[in-house]
Image (tube, helix red, strand yellow):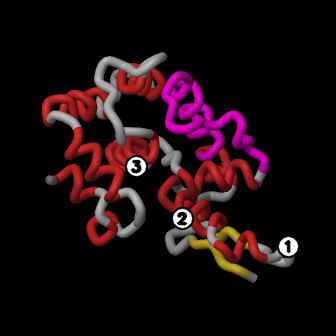
Amino acid sequence: EAFKAFYRFENNHHWKGLNQAAGRAANTSPLDILRKNLKILFNENESVSERIKQLRGEKNGDYSFPWFGQAVYTPLLLVTSNLKHAVINGPVEYALDYLRLWPKQFQVQNNIPEDEWKIIPQMQAIVSEVADRNKLDLWQIDWAWYELQGKDAQSSPKNYWVIIPGGSAGLRKV
């Protein structure tokens, strides 16, 4: 229940659409497999790439199960690593493609994990670099990606966005 509770917006105050995937992950996999996945994921003695490889594998991994994809495990990495590892989810993928930082054709396709262990850390490095250049932490840049994906960002070529660094950082439409 604590696993599912983390993904509810009223608890995390950040991600709105993850509660369904997290609930399915928790409800469709045996609890011992979920625990093994979390133990692997939180093992800071291994690189993120190695952890993803163990979870998702070059094919399906030893502990792979449906609904435990990048949109579910990267938020956990973010909050358990003290904002060290970036979230990679739909809004981030959209933003990286939109800004031509990581084109869609090179992203993980259809949640197929074959190259996920290579792709996710590379995308996280790009997100971290963009955040650093704009003096944002990874929590703040995650909000920026979400805002960029919003309809306002797509509706008119006349939209401009200002990223404001600092403790009250945010994305402002000007």
Q: Is the residue marked by circle 1 packed among few (<14), some (14-19), or many (20+) residues within 10 Å?
A: few
Q: Residue at 65% across / 41% down in the picture?
A: 126
61 left or right, relative to 140: left
Q: Quadrant of residue 39?
A: top left
Q: Is the residue marked by circle 2 packed among few (<14), some (14-19), or many (20+) residues within 10 Å?
A: some
Q: Earlier in the sequence, mark 2 or mark 1?
A: 2
Q: Quadrant of residue 66?
A: top left
For label 2, the residue is 143
Q: Which mark is residue 157?
A: 1
Q: Amino acid at mark 3?
A: Pro
Q: Earlier in the sequence, mark 3 or mark 1?
A: 3
From what the image shows, is residue 37 above or below residue 98? Answer: above
Q: Quadrant of residue 48?
A: top left
Q: Give the magenta part as a residue range.
A: 100-127
Q: Element type at marker 1?
A: loop
Q: Is the residue marked by circle 3 packed among few (<14), some (14-19), or many (20+) residues within 10 Å?
A: many
> Residue 64: x and y, percent?
33, 27
21 left or right, relative to 6: right
Q: Residue at 31% across / 18% down in the picture?
A: 62
Q: Residue at 63% across / 37% down in the picture?
A: 107
For label 3, the residue is 75
Is residue 158 or residue 136 the one in the foreground? Answer: 158
Q: Quadrant of the C terminus?
A: bottom right
Q: Earlier in the sequence, mark 3 or mark 2?
A: 3
Residue 108 among magenta residues: yes
Q: Residue at 66% across / 74% down in the picture?
A: 151
> Residue 90: x and y, percent?
55, 52
> Residue 16: x and y, percent?
41, 66
